Structure formats: C-alpha cells, structure tokens
Image (cartoon, rainbow, N blue to C red):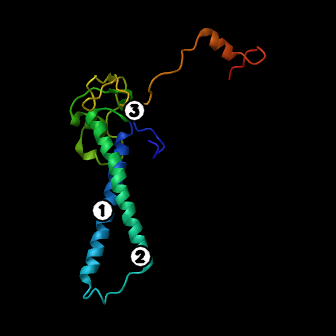
Amino acid sequence: CPWINNCVGLGNQKLFILFLGYTTLSAAVTFVILLVSAAFWLWSQKSWSDAPHPSSVALVCTGVLAVVCLLAIIFIGDFFQEQIESIATNCTLVETYQRTHGKRTTFMDHFRTIFGTHWSVWLWPFPTAPPPDYTELAIPDSDTAGWPGMTIDDPDSLGIEGESTEAPITTMAFHAAAEGINGTTMPRQ
C-alpha cells in the first residue's frame, strides 16, 4: 500500500483494517459532531437576524474540517471496503492482478484467519490470529471468474503483467552482456 509505505499481508492485515475502520469512524463522528453543533447553535438563537455572526476563521476552519472528514469517509471507506472484499474472496489485490486466489471457504473462516477465533479481541490493535499458513497454494481463477463476459484471455481485464514482449535470453547473449567493452569479464558485485 503506497499510503502506509508497507505491504499489507496476512500478518498485518488485521492492523490495517482496524486502522482504516477507526479512521473512517473517527471522521464520521467528527462530521456528525460538526453537524450537531451547527444545528444546536442555530436552534439556540432566539432570532437569526440578531444572532452574532461566527468569525471568518471559525467558518473557514469548520469548512475545511468538514471537507477533510467527507474525503476521509469516502476514500478511506473505499479502502476499508476493498479489504473486507479481500476477506470475503480470500484474494489480495496482487492475487487479483495475477488472477489467483486462496482456498475459498466462508467469510467467517477467512475473517477468523485474520482476526483470530475469539470475538473479544477482534477490535484490539494487536495480532490475535494464529500464525499464518504460508504454504497454502494460490489457486488460478477459472475462465469464468470475475465479471460476466470477462475471461482470462480478455486483454481488457485486470493484470499487471500484460503481454510478454521480451525475447528469452540466450546463452550467447548472456555471455556477451557479462563481458566488458574491452572483452574482459566484469567483476562480481
């Protein structure tokens, strides 16, 4: 994930999901508090024409905070939804690009693999799941996986590799690349 400058995998996915969930929740609560405060201020005025005007600094700060909260709810909420979807499908983003996935079982089985078996520790920000089984094989998606009408050979489907256009390296080309300009071999680094 470029936003946290770290890979999100089975070992830290719970912490990432909690980070996204708590950030979205705090932005939503802050936005609701702003709305309730504004409504209470308006309701508490006897006459809106006689009410003191808020300072321009207060209006700007409140407006900026409201926009930041809405953006956080939208964008971080989208990341949160993607992580929940990855639990449901047992498929990371990289596996989606590679058109593979892990063993498919129920949502709760995948959830317990990440969050642990006991519900009382699910919301605490520390690892609570048993050690991951990194020997689970990646299962290739079938030709009918994904959206209706999309197949593995579909050039418009997701994929980070794309078509391979590089020619395989030959033994002669390898030895030629390993030699320097004057015919001496390059030192090992």
Q: Residue at x 28, y 39 (%)?
A: 85
Name above or below for residue 41 compared with residue 159: below
Identified by mark 3, the residue type is Val
Q: Give me the disc on residue 58.
A: 2
Q: CA distance from mark 2 to mark 3?
A: 44 Å
Q: Specify few, some or many for label 2: CA neighbours under 10 Å numbering under 14, 14-19, or 20 or more.
A: few
Q: CA distance from mark 1 to mark 2?
A: 19 Å
Q: Disc 1 designates what residue?
A: 29
Which of 110/118 is in front? 110
Q: Residue at x 31, y 56 (%)?
A: 25
Residue 31 found in image quarter: bottom left
Q: Residue at x 72, y 19 (%)?
A: 187
Using the rendered image of the protein, determine whether residue 47 is visible from the camera's viewpoint: yes
Circles 1 and 2: CB atoms closer than 8 Å: no
Residue 5 vs residue 131: left or right? right
Instruction: Label 2: state its secondary structure.
Output: helix
Circles 2 and 3: CB atoms closer than 8 Å: no
Instruction: Label 3: state its secondary structure.
Output: helix
